[in-house]
Amino acid sequence: MKKIILWITIFAFLLTTKTVSAATQDTFYEGSYIPNAYIKKLHNGRGTYKQMKFIIRQRDGMFAYCIEPWETLSSYDPYDESYNIHDLSDEVLEHINKIAYYGYGYQNHTDSIWYAVTQLMIWRYVEPGDEFYFTGTLNGTKTTKYDAMFQELENLVQQSSPLSFQPSSISFLLGTTGNISVVGDLNNYQIQASDGLSFTVQGQTISLHSSVPGTYQLQFVEKENNRSNIPLVYRDANSQSLLVVGSKRANQYTIPVTIYTGSIELIKQDSASASISSGEASLAGAKFLIQKEDGTFSETVTIPESLSVSISGLGAGTYTITEVKAGEGYQLNKKIETVVLDVNNYQIHIPFYNDVIEKKITIYKTYGTSKQLWPEENAVFEIYHSEELIATIQTDENGYGSINLPYGTYRIKQIQGKDGYDFVPEFTVSVTEDDEELFYPLTDYLKTGTLQIYKRDWDSQELIVSDGFQFLVTNLETNEEYTVFTKDGIATLSELLPGRYSIQEVTSESGYQIEEQAFFFEITDVDLEEANFIYSFDIYNKKVNVPNTGVDAFSSTIFGILLVAIGNIVLCKRKLGF
């Protein structure tokens, strides 16, 4: 800010001093032609066509603008720095410097045609009675090709106009919002607030906020220029006066701000456990709407992890506090609190209680096989939260067991059930804010095994891929019999209870002998401790032998020759007509 004020001081000094002693002298010359920059100048009905050139300061190559369109340039003659140019006012000099500032070289104005546009706009301003315009060619007709560039430059100059404020000073209660309306382009300004004062900008409105009472200042400072030098005007008694573009004068404004104070502290508590959250529920995250009865204040706050929040800087009056959103896993507290804040009671503390969301978890337990199920009594389940055992459920004679759990996710593990039956795998349940019923039908299935019989060729040991083998499997303890067929050479029989069994082949695939030997196997309780236990059996079959007819190879050969001879004789007789 000090740098900005320094430039303002220098520029203001130059602008308000009508005669400046020549501190330095510079020389200028015409640079190269600007492509397509053909213009015409008209004064009292008489005109001149020309193609625009740059005017260059010799010592550093800096470009300059002519501010006397009807004077000629004395190339390489010495020029004096001066602001006494034919009695041009400070306002005129400031305006043409703005044109030069926003013209060629500003942001994306890098094409050389911008120099010509800027030069013509300066001439139009200093000589409003004359006419200056572009032509399509040298000595050509008027063109509007660059009108959009003129308009863009004019808009930039106008946007740099001073700001006005309503109000010019402001006082408001801390915690409310103070609004200032601004006329002018805020995009050209840096807004700086005193420590402790914050602000937001929405269009042409500035909203002020603070968390600390006191007196503040809001300052508006025109943004830094993209020129490091101050603007310089050069004159020569025998030539046109020139302007070297520089930084423009920065505007600055200060708005006094005064704030008063008061506060309300909201404290969140669990209805059952005071300040401690239940399960995975969290009191933090609850939202409250604080409103002033007269409608001049309204604010929504969120409870942090500390479970308390203060709304500070409130003005005197009556306020209502409404919980609009409960913390995760809690029921909304619908009670509306009303408090009166005045000079005798300006720090108010209000506890807000919430009931945690709970749901009934119901388990319906059965046991049996895939064919028949029965309710299971005295099945026991452990409930864990974050690896901590918090409760157990035991089923009644009808197989039902239930428990109420607070908001959160829990792991349930069966630890007791019928002997000889598989326990259900561990599972998780989640108590959430939805209305979903938490009912879990669970079944312990009888531990059984599976028999797989592989039919193999006796000679090759390879699997006989066939559906033509049939077996009779008998439980030797219960005398239950099961018939099973191969599928692609494998016979499978499931749900076998512990016990001793026999296998008898009943039919075989065509081309194979029946294996008449009976096979025996046993499934034990130990076997069934293995999940998905399978007892595999390989049964080999011999191929059926082809019977011998008693004709040897020599006899077969003689017999064949005789048949051929007889055939030839018959054929010859037919051809001879016999």
Image (tube, rainbow, N blue to C red):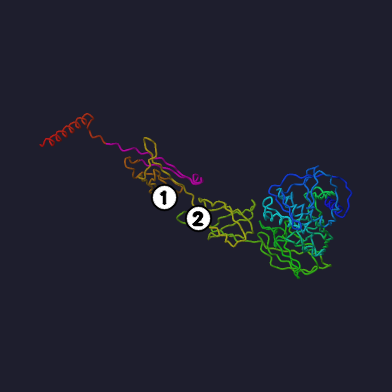
Q: Nearer the viewer, residue 544 or 196?
A: 196
The alpha-carbon separation of the residues under discs 1 and 2 comes to 21 Å
Q: Residue 519 lies in magenta, yes or no?
A: yes
Q: Residue furthest front?
A: 46
| Image quadrant in which you'd find residue 555 | top left
Is residue 177 among the parts visible in the rendering?
no
**292 lies left or right of 18:** left
Q: How busy is the neighbourhood of tag 2: few (under 14 within 10 Å), some, or many (20 plus)?
A: many
Q: How busy is the neighbourhood of tag 1: few (under 14 within 10 Å), some, or many (20 plus)?
A: few
**525 lies left or right of 168:** left
Q: Residue at x 36, y 39 (%)?
A: 541
Q: Say whether disc 1 or disc 2 marks the residue closer to the N-terminus.
A: 2
Return the x and y of residue 162 as percentages of the image width and height: 79, 59
Q: Nearer the viewer, residue 281 or 226?
A: 226
Return the x and y of residue 119 as percentages of the image width and height: 75, 52
Quarter of the image for the C terminus: give it.
Answer: top left
Q: Residue 99 lies in magenta, yes or no?
A: no
Q: Nearer the viewer, residue 37 or 280?
A: 37
Residue type, numbered disc 1: Thr
Q: Which mark is residue 367?
A: 2
Q: Residue furthest left?
A: 578
Q: Which residue is mark 1?
A: 478
Secondary element under disc 2, as helix, strand or loop, is: strand
| Image quadrant in which you'd find residue 460 | top left
Residue type, numbered disc 2: Tyr
Q: Residue furthest top?
A: 554
Is residue 356 among the parts visible in the rendering?
yes
Q: Which mark is residue 65?
A: none
Tell me which segment is drawn in magenta: 517-546
**429 lies left or right of 497:** right
